Amino acid sequence: MSTASCDVRNVVLVGHTGAGKTALVDRLLATAGPPERQNDDHQLVHTSYVGHADPDHRPSRSVGLSLCSVSHRGLTINLLDTPGYPDFIGELRAGLRAADAALFVISAVDGVDGATGLLWTECAEVGMPRAIAITHLDHARADFTAAVEECQRAFGTGVLPAWLPHRTADGTVRLTGLLTGRTVEYGPGGRRESTAESGWSDVHHAAAHAALVEGIIAESEDETLLDRYLSGVDPDPDLLLADLETAVARGTFFPVLPVGLRTDQGANHGTGERIPARTGGFGSTELLDLLVQGFPAPAEHPLPALTRPDGTVCDPGTGDPAGPLVAEVVKTTTDPYVGRMSVVRVFSGTLRPDDPVHVSGHGRATAGHADHDDDERVGALSRPYGSALHSMPDCPAGGICVVTKLATAETGDTLSSLDDPRHLPAWTMPEPLLPVAIRARGRADEDRLSTALSRLAVEDPTLRVVQDPETAQLVLWSMGEAHADAVLERLAQRYGATVDRVAAIIPLRETLRAPAHGLGRQVKQSGGHGQYAVCQLEVEPLPPGSGFEFVDEIVGGAIPRSFIPSVEKGVRAQMAQGVRAGHPLTDLRVRLVDGRSHSVDSSDLAFQIAGGLALRDAVRSGGVVVLEPVLAVDVSVPDEFVGTVVSDLSTRRGRVVGMDPVPSAPGSAPSFAATRTVVHAEVPESEMSRYAIELRSLSHGTGSFHREPHGFEPMPPQLTDSLSG
Ligand SMILES: Nc1nc2c(ncn2[C@@H]2O[C@H](COP(=O)(O)OP(=O)(O)OP(=O)(O)O)[C@@H](O)[C@H]2O)c(=O)[nH]1
Ligand SMILES: [Mg+2]
């Protein structure tokens, strides 16, 4: 029996690194059960690459998206745990794409950071339903009310607590439901529902209850509710609950829940010890209730736009399990035991084991992923519970499953039926902007490296592998240090390819300092077939970006016409080779003004050599200027950081050439609604190699930038020596 799509909830957990997302999934896993067994045939395989790894076998910071399916009140909840560290934004994007609703996990100690604010705005733009779980409430400095107020300041109206926590002296946590007045106690004996209602005797509770009721009424479509409330009738909690659920599903109301550990569960603040993972903690059941009742079924979530292979837009449909197959590879990876595994979100139709499917990936060519279309057969379908896989008979629209054996599928690809292929649009991914140059350690490493890197690039849309033709260096473009480290670790552990980081070479150029005359003589006439070529050049520097100009000013046949191209060829070869420090020469005008030839001994080769010698001669007398590559950089930051960014760019020898305001998007989180400005600047490339990391700290995680080559400019003489190479 398959799970109907109305019985599924797809929820992505997002928030700052260390906020407690993975720990919360541990507790939800302990509270809920495994998804209803579809059959007895469940494989127990280690799947930490896509599933929820055992706490003892995972890094302290999540580095990838993980999926865990749990069951609660007869529904399947697919929990997509994302890494909060900004380097792994590609995994976060994948989680957002696969989910229908987002749970923001906020630490009561650390609060809301800029990146989380931006993410909220992004969810608001697409009307994604959201709720907030407050963690780390066992910390001495933590205060639930203050944390809620911070969320309200950051995210705006519609953020209201649904439960209030109270911790007693013995460590028991009592939660009061602000809608119903029900209380639930989490003590040493576990969870206990109290039959006594609070009756709103507590002033604080009464005020919070009133705020919640008024908030729901404000969002309600039933206008009589407000009249009745104003006339003193407290509305029926069931009606309010229904309205609350509608408002949550519509993305206009955002309930806040306290979740966490009882103090008797060994809170680790100050000690750094790991919390026992398999304890339910408090608030888990209430949170699971909210996920199944408040968050929408997949069919209520608008489906992404669809096109046919010829580019025509087609109706995305209604997410009908009987409709045409449209599914997306949200993540793909290679598990040492299971082989190729892909996490797939089905948007329409039904995916069945062993089905032939059309796999297509388009629109990512600029990011180094060539367009591809292949037909292949899917393997087994399963859902992960913890680190074990449970097989599934099929996966209808709305579901998420793990598919094995999809050999050609890349992260972001679309799966559709062979006779009716469709494409989902490519995700918008930030550019990888941190270059890391690497070199294989030994011969065996080198042999494995290219296959390993191409496999990793297929899995990870935020990784770009570039073999620089000029410097012959292999450069990994990554999102940040932690991302680069994770890639290098995978290279070594999964593919046995060990590499060393090396200093990245910035390719330089040279040009002539002052106009100069050059004489080239290639004269060898002692015995046998000789060589005879003489040429005279007038060489002058041109403005940056002009490139190379060759002017033939030979009159009277001093050099035969057929050898003039030979001189030019020789000059060009010498320019590419460089003269002084081996940097190619550029921005020159070379005028061939005179020369001599011999009727027998002159040849193409002799004039090529003479051309090269003449250029060397001119460079010797005119001197050289070293040119360095300059980038055109567009930095986008909230207005408050513009001053910091501009002064930082000037310390990088950058030149600000303009600024443009960018209006904030509708629905922005209020604290992050300040308009943004794009600062346009020209900055030497050598100063920008670590900008991806440095801008993040300058702008508190809210800045982004784009870089493009912008030619070459003279390098300050004091830097020439240290960088020439
Ligand atoms: N005392 C206490 N510790 C917590 C709580 N929630 C999480 N932790 C601990 O905080 C640390 C970080 O928690 P994680 O769940 O790994 O954080 P995360 O949000 O998944 O972080 P990333 O994976 O980097 O995004 C772990 O040691 C947890 O055991 C909490 O409510 N109270
Ligand atoms: Mg985590």
Image (tube, rainbow, N blue to C red):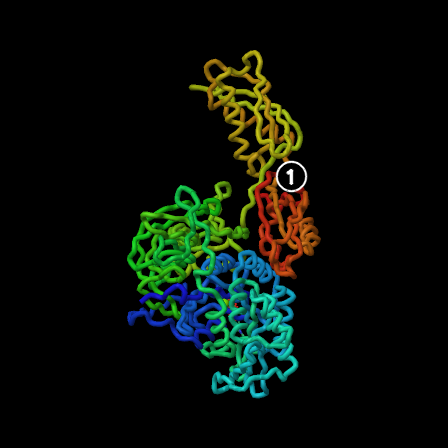
Disc 1 residue crowd, few under 14, some 14–19, many 20+, Cα 10 Å = some
Q: For residue 39, which quarter of the picture? A: bottom left
Q: Which residue is mark 1?
A: 714
Depth order, front residue of 702/626: 702
Q: Quadrant of the N terminus?
A: bottom left
385 displayed left or right of 178:
left
453 displayed left or right of 437:
left
Is the residue 413 above or below the residue 582 in the image? below
* Amino acid at pointer 1: Pro
Is the residue 262 above or below the residue 77 in the image? below
Give how far across and how far down residue 80 sits, in percent: 46, 65
- Asked if one can make out residue 108 in the rendered structure from this viewpoint, the answer is no
Give how far across and how far down residue 400 sits, in percent: 40, 62
Depth order, front residue of 348/497: 348
Q: Is mark 1 within 8 Å of ligand 1?
A: no
- Residue at 56% over, 88% down: 170
- Residue at 59% over, 22% down: 591
Residue lying farthest to the top in this orientation? 556
Q: Quadrant of the C terminus?
A: top right
Depth order, front residue of 481/37: 37
- Residue at 62% over, 31% down: 620
- Residue at 56% over, 70% down: 255
Give how far across and how far down residue 465 sits, in percent: 46, 49
Q: Callout 1: helix, strand or loop? A: strand
133 displayed left or right of 399:
right
Is the residue 402 above or below the residue 442 in the image? below
Query: How many numbered marks, from 0 up?
Result: 1
- Asked if one can make out residue 541 in the rendered structure from this viewpoint, the answer is yes
